[in-house]
Image (tube, rainbow, N blue to C red):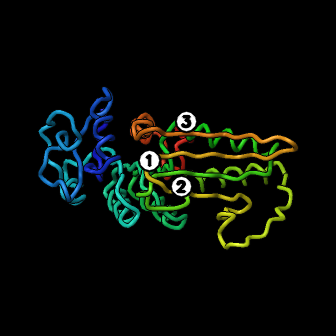
Amino acid sequence: MLRVMVCGAGGKMGREVVKAVHADAELVMAGGIDPSQAGNDVGTVAGIESLHIPMAASLDEVLGENKPDVIVDFTSPAIIFENAKKILGAGVHIVIGTTGLSQEQRDELAAIGKANNANCLVAPNFSLGAVMMMKVSAELAQYFPNVEIIELHHNHKYDAPSGTAVLTAKLINEAKAAANVVATEDLTRESLPGARGAKVDDVTIHSVRLPGYVAHQEVIFGGYDEVLVVRHDSLSRLSFMPGVVLACKKIVEHPGLTYGLEHYL
């Protein structure tokens, strides 16, 4: 039975993770960390029955003798790197759903984890459907090298483009390179800077931020007299919970730092 804590347990995603972990028979909900809810019951904050576990104000309070096996972090890009360094340095596995980590930061976390026998998963998206969308898009890229991505999220999302869109573009670019195919030349010239979106190597990404959306992405492939669209929609934060629970259970089996939930499937 793995003991799991949630960092950012008072947030929208954090509350759903608390409920999902508590409901799973193979995991033990061991606590939550959120300075804005310090002292309040973790279960009550999440909207379920009292778990008789007071919310901790900081990571320092939970990384002592009774530290958990796994910490799930859904906090903010401003603090995720320092959180992850502290957690891995304490020899605790970490599942990261917070965006914003650079390749250099991930490399540093990998080294810290290796030195302390602690594993790390950084997942741009925990939705199993989104993972399949990325996998299918990479497979299609060799046949349809002309491709653009439109990602749509709520207007409180911190970053643009999304981590999912960036990873999708990366996988598409790798697949095109492996198949030695290139897109036909884009002859469009912007009359308004930024109108054509942002480039991740050879793939253009467009970001939409509006109230009402949760997390959505279209990968649009253009061919000869045809268009193929792969679309995924997360209709609520519940769609991410099976992936989070899977990550908590699988992380002990995957040494080092892993980028992308697809490697756990």
Left/right of residue 37 with respect to residue 182 in the rendered view: left
* Residue kind at label 3, given as amino acid type: Gly
Residue 62: percent from left, percent from top: 21, 53
Among the 4 quarters of the image, the one containing residue 130: top right
Instruction: Give the quarter of the figure containing the N terminus.
Output: top left
Q: Nearer the viewer, mark 1 or mark 3?
A: 1
| Relative to 36, residue 14 above or below | above
Mark 2 or mark 3, which has the lower sequence index? 3
Mark 1 or mark 3, which has the lower sequence index? 3
x 67%, y 73%: residue: 193
Q: Residues within 10 Å of mark 1 (few under 14, many from 20)?
A: few
Kindly identify which numbered label has been placed on residue 129: 3
Q: Residues within 10 Å of mark 3 (few under 14, many from 20)?
A: some
Residue 262: percent from left, percent from top: 56, 41
3D distance between C-alphas at marks 1 and 2 = 20 Å
| Relative to 105, residue 12 above or below | above
* Residue kind at label 1, given as amino acid type: Gly
Left/right of residue 70 with respect to residue 208 in the rendered view: left
Among the 4 quarters of the image, the one containing residue 170: bottom right
Q: Which structural element holds mark 1? A: loop
x 47%, y 42%: residue: 126
3D distance between C-alphas at marks 1 and 3 = 20 Å
3D distance between C-alphas at marks 2 and 3 = 15 Å
Report the residue marked by disc 1: 212
Q: Residue furthest front?
A: 191
Q: Nearer the viewer, mark 1 or mark 2?
A: 1
Report the residue marked by disc 2: 163
* Residue kind at label 2, given as amino acid type: Gly
